[in-house]
Amino acid sequence: MSGYLDRAALYDGMLEHMAHALKPVDMGRLMPHLGGIMDGALPQVAEDLQAYAERDPASCGRTELILGTYASFKAVLFHRLAHRVWQQDGLENRQLIAQRLANAGKLQSGVEIHPATRIGRRFVLDHGFGTVIGETCEIGDDCYLLSGVTLGASGIADNPGGKRHPRLGNGVEVGAGARILGAVNIGDNVFIAPACVVTRDVPANTRVSIVNQLQMQRAAQGSNRGYLGAFALGDRLHLVGELPDVGEISVLDAEHRRLASLSLECTVHERHHRQYHLRTLDACAQPPLYPVHLRVGGPAHHVTLLDPPGLSSLVSSIVTTPHLLRMED
């Protein structure tokens, strides 16, 4: 059966899981809506299962092995059912039934996924024990998460309602033990290394590592540049990481327009550390739009570090109304 997916058997297995997880009264309420729920969930589960078989070498492509024995896949299966139930109009106690399905997945896998979470196609949750995915999370297509990942809110208790969890783009990979906290946006094709704590937006095609709580980034795979990070301390901007061939450095406003009135003078030039003094050249009528970002250019590529710690405060203390010059493409 390796490489072959029996959809009839998958359909029966999903129904069996649902029947074991719910009370008879819940199944009775579901019956008028069951066809639509199953028709919506089955193609998603089938794609998830096939993606898992293709991306997990330990399974040797055996979908029946994953479906029958992989606890982390059960969490995804139950979420697909729970999410469909959560969205089903006209179903009495739909949220309670959805939560019961999600809880069954949690008990079997150690993974907690809120039924309202929106997850795209071909989702792979590998060795997922300890993973928590919050209510307002949005996950794109072809994402891959490992164990102990938290996609959570930035607070601890008494978090406000509304959007408070991350949004992951397409093709995002998150290593074991990573935490992505708050309503941050993770761009397409981002790789987040294990044990990272990410609390700021990450642009597309970026690899992220965390060193001493400083978010480090580099350009997409294939770039010869290493990881870079930046922070402002006092009246100085610090650029740290693997810094060969660093060329132009500029500060951008919230709309990624260069602050042309801002000059950066390098005062310390070391292998893994550059220090810059910021000063203004002129001023005009329009104030900058915050938060500000840092663009680091090289001979053939560039990296944009989003809202480095302390940079917005430093710029606001020295710049009143800088001239904004739109960056060239």
Image: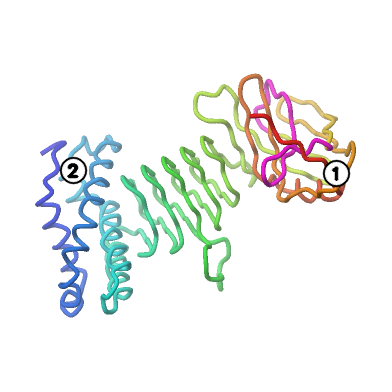
Q: Tell me residue 315's x, y (percent).
A: 81, 46
* Magenta stretch: includes residue 106: no
In what element is the residue under mark 2? helix
In what element is the residue under mark 1? loop
- Total count of labels: 2
Identity of the residue drawn at 72% across and 40% down: 252
> How busy is the neighbourhood of tag 2: few (under 14 within 10 Å), some, or many (20 plus)?
many
Q: Quadrant of the N terminus?
A: top left
Identity of the residue drawn at 21% across and 46% down: 66
- Residue furthest to the front in view is 285
Q: Tell me residue 188's x, y (percent).
A: 47, 40
Q: Is residue 200 above or below residue 91?
A: above
Magenta part of the protein: which range? 240-261
Q: CA distance from mark 1 to mark 2?
A: 58 Å
The type of residue carrying mark 1 is Asp
Among numbered discs 1 and 2, the one appearing first in the sequence:
2
Give the main secondary structure of the magenta stretch.
Answer: loop
Q: Is 89 placed left or right of 175 in the picture?
A: left
Task: Give the number of the disc on residue 327.
Answer: none
The type of residue carrying mark 2 is Thr
Q: Quadrant of the C terminus?
A: top right
User: What residue is disc 2 on?
Assistant: 63
Identity of the residue drawn at 28% across and 58% down: 80
> How busy is the neighbourhood of tag 1: few (under 14 within 10 Å), some, or many (20 plus)?
some
Q: Tell me residue 277's x, y (percent).
A: 85, 36
Q: Is 207 placed left or right of 52 in the picture?
A: right
User: What residue is disc 1 on?
Assistant: 235
